[in-house]
Amino acid sequence: MQTPSPSRLLPWLLGAIGAFSVLWLLDRLSAVLAPFITAAVLAYILDPLVDRLQTRRLSRSAALLLVMLAGCFIVLGLLLIVVPMLISQAQALATRLPVLVDFVQHTALPWLNHTLGTAISIDSQSWREALAGNAAGVRQALARIAPQLGHGGALLLQTVANLSLLPVLLYYFLHGWDDMVQRAATLVPRRWVDEVGRIASEVDDMLGQFLRGQLSVMLIMALIYGGGLALVGLDSGLAIGIVAGLLVFIPYLGAFLGLLLATLAALLQFDSFSGLLLVWGVFAVGQLLESFLITPYLVGERIGLSPVTVIFALMAFGELMGFAGVLLALPLSAITVILGRHLIRHYFNSRFYQRRIEP
């Protein structure tokens, strides 16, 4: 094998310089770029659906408006379902904490002591006094910091502005997505077109499988968790299940948070362990279906992004670039994996790796 010529190594050098420059720029402008990056990621996910609608004799504008309206109705419906249920659950938690203490003392602990042979006990009166004292302390702390909350008005205004700007940006990204891709392709030097095209195709294939497959997994798991908790009779179970399902894209976080909220709600609602066991059963079945059937079928194992990689990417890019980093974590990770594969292949094919030193 021949050593790669400088002309073949130059694209990698320029690509590395460009990547570091983009990362630095994203770090400096992360707050401003957040709605643009969000719109770009959504446009990448939704563009195939818009293209498919165009094949049904719809214009580009009509197709993307239809997709955006459907997305807005879905988000609005979720908010109208989830938010009131979570608020009512929080109110029920605040009013039924003494009941929970009595349940732990008179039902849970006797069963635990009888099963394990222990002698654990609590003083419910001291718990009630501690809860009441902490509640008063929280109210006093809120009263002290209330005058300072006005300083967050600028941040709230920026958040509202970004949310209102997002549909406009998404419309323009979707409307000109194909043209933007073609213009970006024309900027690639002709001598590098084949290699860059292969890398771009691999990145697009990986991201397409992961993002669209993961979106399907989120929707299916929201239906499984929400429907299962509603069937077992858990109040606000639908809202808790939807939240747990939509957080599935962060491995284990959605199931853990949903299980925690559902367990707390079950302890407040049911007077026996049967209801709690039913709730746990819903999450056990959901985890089995997700791990062994839904995720392998819809996402697949050949995308190259393991759960550990996803968790690390979300945490690392989120720490470096804030919310914009969370949005770009998976695309940048996929690009890094693809580039790493090509670099390793070039390294194994190089004379530096294959040449032996003669004794």
Image (cartoon, rainbow, N blue to C red):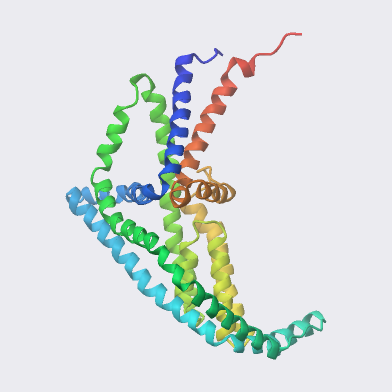
Q: Is residue 306 left or right of residue 238?
A: right
Q: Position of residue 26 (x, y in %)?
A: 43, 42
Is residue 132 visible from the viewing direction of this image?
yes
Q: Is residue 57 left or right of residue 163?
A: left
Q: Quarter of the image for the C terminus: give it.
A: top right
> Which residue is at the front of the view, 241 or 330?
330
Q: Position of residue 255 (x, y in %)?
A: 55, 65
Q: Is residue 6 above or below residue 147?
A: above
Give me the residue at 47% from left, 33% from top.
20
Give me the residue at 49% from left, 56% from top.
249
Count numbered badges in the picture: 0
Q: Residue 83: which quarter of the image? A: bottom left
Is residue 235 visible from the viewing direction of this image?
no
Give me the residue at 40% from left, 28% from top.
196
Q: Is residue 31 above or below residue 185?
A: below
Give me the residue at 82% from left, 81% from top.
118
